[in-house]
Image (cartoon, helix red, strand yellow):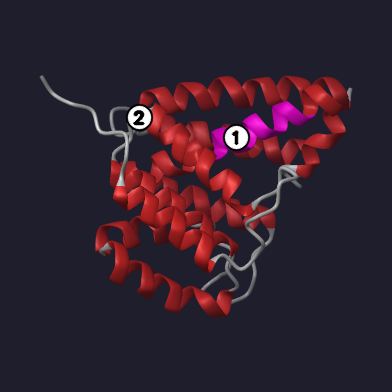
């Protein structure tokens, strides 16, 4: 009889690494702890049967996303040294492309254009991480909308309504062109949640 092991030393190590190296406070109890989104995305990936490498990379991606530009190169080297090249490559590809090759910070929409290019050519692992992250963002937005009203969705995503709808639709278009490569259950959940967000926001905007 095959046993199931719920504990993972690699996942534990990744979470501890994030807590140690995160540039912001990680011990807040008001719903804005830096590790809440990290842990939630790890849970989403686990529920969709993602492998350990994908979950570890997703955890570390949030650390990279939160780190200032001057820390990125040494942080990536540290990740490669501690977690291996496969994890480091997935983290780099799944991280928010906040800066262009000249080191200038991209606008929200320019960042999303670059992200779409990465999604189109990235591995299935990287796509899974992006999809789980967007599922979490949609879930948080829906919670705020239901509790407080549509205007509070901006606390989760600063984009105007039309840009947010474009982003969600573009993700689904890119992922839809890779049928068989990406995890269908993640795509289905994102399609459902993003559709609910769109319905609420369109209603509030009318």
Q: Mark 2 — residue?
A: 183
Where is residue 65 drawn, in percent x and y? 55, 60
127 relative position to 107: left or right = left
Residue at point 60%, 34% (across, down): 168
Query: Is any atom of residue 158 visible in this view?
Result: yes
User: Residue at horizontal 76%, vertical 47%?
Assistant: 158
**10 Å crowding of disc 2: few (<14), some (14-19), many (20+):** some
The label shown at residue 84 is none
Which contiguous range is marked in magenta? 133-144
Point out residue 90 in the picture as x, y percentages from the top left corner: 35, 55
Quarter holding the N terminus? top left
**For this view, does 172 lie left or right of residue 121?**
right
**Residue 113 lies in the magenta stretch:** no
Dot 1 corresponds to which residue? 168
The total of numbered circles placed on residues is: 2
Closer to the camera, 197 or 31?
Answer: 31
x then y, percent, for residue 11: 36, 49
């Amino acid at each position: 009889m095959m046993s199931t092991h719920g504990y993972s030393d690699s996942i534990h190590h990744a979470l501890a690494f994030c807590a140690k190296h995160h540039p912001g406070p990680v011990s807040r109890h008001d719903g804005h702890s830096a590790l809440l989104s990290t842990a939630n995305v790890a849970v989403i990936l686990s529920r969709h049967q993602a492998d350990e490498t994908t979950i570890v990379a997703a955890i570390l991606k949030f650390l990279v996303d939160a780190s200032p530009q001057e820390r990125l190169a040494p942080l990536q080297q540290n990740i490669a040294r501690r977690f291996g090249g496969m994890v480091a490559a997935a983290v780099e590809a799944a991280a928010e492309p906040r800066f262009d090759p000249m080191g200038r910070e991209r606008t929200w929409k320019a960042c999303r254009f670059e992200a779409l290019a990465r999604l189109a050519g990235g591995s299935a692992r990287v796509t899974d991480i992006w999809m789980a992250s967007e599922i979490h963002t949609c879930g948080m937005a829906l919670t705020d909308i239901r509790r407080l009203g549509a205007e509070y969705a901006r606390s989760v995503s600063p984009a105007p309504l039309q840009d947010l709808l474009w982003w969600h639709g573009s993700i689904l278009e890119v992922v839809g062109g890779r049928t068989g490569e990406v995890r269908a259950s993640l795509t289905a959940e994102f399609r459902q949640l993003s559709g609910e967000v769109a319905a609420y926001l369109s209603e509030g905007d009318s």
